[in-house]
Image (cartoon, coloured by chain):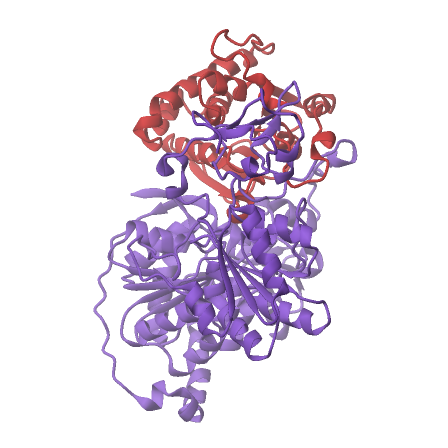
Amino acid sequence: MTETTNLIFAGVGGQGVLLIAELTARAAVRAGFDVKQTEVHGVSQRGGSVESHVRFGPEVHSPLVIAGQADVVIGLEKLEGLRYASFVNPQSGTVLVNDHEIIPGSVANAAERYPHHALDFLRDKGLKVVALPASQRAHDMGDGRIANVIMLGAMSVLLPRVPKEVWLVTLDERIPAKHRTLNLKAFETGRGLASPASNPLPFPTAVPSGEGEGRGEREA
Amino acid sequence: MKEFLLGNEAIARGAWEGGVKFASGYPGTPSTEILETLARQYPEVDAQWSANEKVAFEEGMGAAIGGLRVLVTMKMVGLNVAADSFMVFPYSGTNGGFVVISADDPGMHSSQNEQDNRYLAQMAKVPVLEPSTAQECKDFVKLGLEISEQFSVPLMLRTTTRLAHHKGLVELGERLEVPQREFVPDAKRFSVPIYRTLLRPGVEKRIAALRAYAETTPVNRAEWRSGKAGQPPAKGSLGCVASSIAYQYVREVMPEASVFRLGMTHPLPPRALKEFCAAHETIYVVEEGEPFVEDQLKAMGITNVVGKEIFGVIGEYSPERIAKAIGLNVPDQPDFSKEITVLPRPPMFCIGCGHRTVFDSLRQLKVTVAGDIGCYTMGALPPYEASHTTFCMGASIATAFGLERAGHGRTVAVIGDSTFVHSGIPPLIDAVYNGSSLTLLILDNSTTGMTGQQSHPSSGKTLRGKPAPKLDLEGLVRAAGVRQVQVVDTWERKEVAKAIRSALAYEGPAVVIATGPCMRLPEMRLSERGEKPYFIDEALCTKCDACFKVWCPAITRTALGFPIIDPLECTACTVCAQVCPVDAIAPEGGGCP
């Protein structure tokens, strides 16, 4: 099973979960692997929980990742990271989470019941959890929606079997020209955020001064 | 050349390569992307959305007996709608190749029930192919067209959600240009009800010929890893009979096991299966859905079969489900929800969705509401909880009629424009005819929203985005005999509420058409509409929280307790501004609304 890389992408409909899953799958194809990806379309995209599985290696049969075998569970939102963390390999995997909260809209008293301490909870379970301020950085860059590609950049550091050049070519190919510069910048930002991770923690916590100020209160 | 394709994209490619000239269907998860791909990428195929699956099937049937190669697509419950023609078409048989996609949804990701359509195919005496990879999705469409022509029979290609919505590498081929076959008018063949007794034996002959074909087709094959053909089983030897995506799960978790891989699951090849099963001590039958293959194996007298008693019939299969069922040591997935609140995140109405005002009104009116299939099923969820039944396409109106007859007062039916066209028109005619006083709300968002914005007869566009005659819903409803018909702007919340109250008070059937395009349509982007997001002026805001009561997800609270609208999410639907008592909400850069 070690020959196959197993990835779970999770987030909230509209965050671009499926886009970064597809970019990852295409990068793995370009790197010469057999690849399968799966996701559920339709109703789950209406602001609901969204997940995608990507598996690559010499030969891949099932598109679904087996629980406990994911090398990386990437959560674009904290609660969604928690929801899918049970897929991670407890010995060798990483739960990579965007430290960002989106309160479910169609659940009673969701704001009061939201598990703000989810990441500490997962760490207490002995899982390797890496939290990154991707949404914060995305706001600082002027577009909150780019948080997904920041997280993709961070994840790419954890997947050395796909070289950086392959990621860049894949982004270049799939992202429309007018968004390309911002996406490449976001990808590099993510790589920068994650690189100290392999050393390992801590991460830079200081937000660059200037344009980002005052944005954080919206997260409340 | 290999491409990384979605199962549904591969099916579209297979249709194109296989020389299909006509393709029709009705949107339904997990089948929708097939026709969308044909429309986007393959101009040689005349592809269209039809009013419903029965219409799509019959158009395809006509094109096929007219000599073309045809693909018809639908989700599994769509085949219920088309079942009338599906059951009778095999009597005449086809002329050009005819493949119908039945996209089944084990686990009910986007469906109201679980339904294994192989039984429908068995009932109709129609052959079934079940691919297990994206590559096979493409190849089996081409093979299906050939089988269809060789045996003059319509063919079902059954996918499941996981297959339709997974991506894998697919080797591409060239398009085969197939000459149109000649249509020879023949009442004895094509006027089935009159000549049914002449045609009936042919149906049996055809299925017998297909059974013989199933013995030799390369898509049914024994992959020997343990055990030997013609040898008695070694002790403990294990074989699997598997189809569809479950075959991949078997390969994943039992790499050492022999597998009889069924690419064609109806009719089954008894001789080959008996030989395979006799060479193993135990045979696992791994098929998602019902024990369709398993029960037939047992009926063939094969006794060493283990299937649904360990794998189960309910829900979607997964590699770990298979592994656990056969007793492999798979660690349990930890269940964190016992120790921490893992809040659910069900889907909800989009920001600015025009359905919100309708369900807000219904919630306050406390009437009995029969819903239908579409995004508006979410009207049953908090915070609205204002939709009380949903069954299947078009059921709202007749259900509301029945509830009315059962004494639940003036009932309300809620249906979208696409679903109304699909199957809402006969029940409305019936309600008028039988003297109902129900209120029908047609939520006209100019698209088939739930499945991802597909065009339909009242959207004014074709599948390929070309202008089309736009069905006049108001005129149609009036022609059905409804006297009170009101058309309102769905974002004018007071107007919506007033219209619904007026309809409920009316003696006789009444219709409210709430119009406003789906916010996910490209033309509804703020930049396309030339509008600006709204903002809340904190100097005027009294923190009365009225704007929170429109439940817009774009409105959150600042650290100081003021409401704030996310400018990236706001759709300028104006509903929050309508409820603000102090006019503190206005478009950016503009004055008061």
- Give the residue at x 59% y 57%: B500
**Quadrant assignment, res A46:** top right
**Quadrant assignment, res B456:** bottom left
Residue A37, percent across and down? 48, 40
Closest to the observer, B185 or A145: A145
| Colour chosen for chain B | purple
Residue B312, percent across and down? 68, 57
Query: Would you place residue B249 above or below residue B90 in this image?
Result: above
Residue B223, percent across and down? 49, 55
**Quadrant assignment, res A31:** top left
Q: In which quarter of the image is the N terminus of chain B?
A: top left
Can residue A116 be seen? yes
- Give the residue at x 63% y 71%: B401
Closest to the observer, B142 or B347: B347
Q: How many labels does the image show?
A: 0
- Give the residue at x 44% y 88%: B201
Q: Is residue A120 left or right of residue B70?
A: right
Which chain is in red here? A
Residue A87, percent across and down? 63, 34
Closest to the observer, B349 or A159: B349
Query: Would you place residue B271 above or below residue B194 in this image?
Result: above
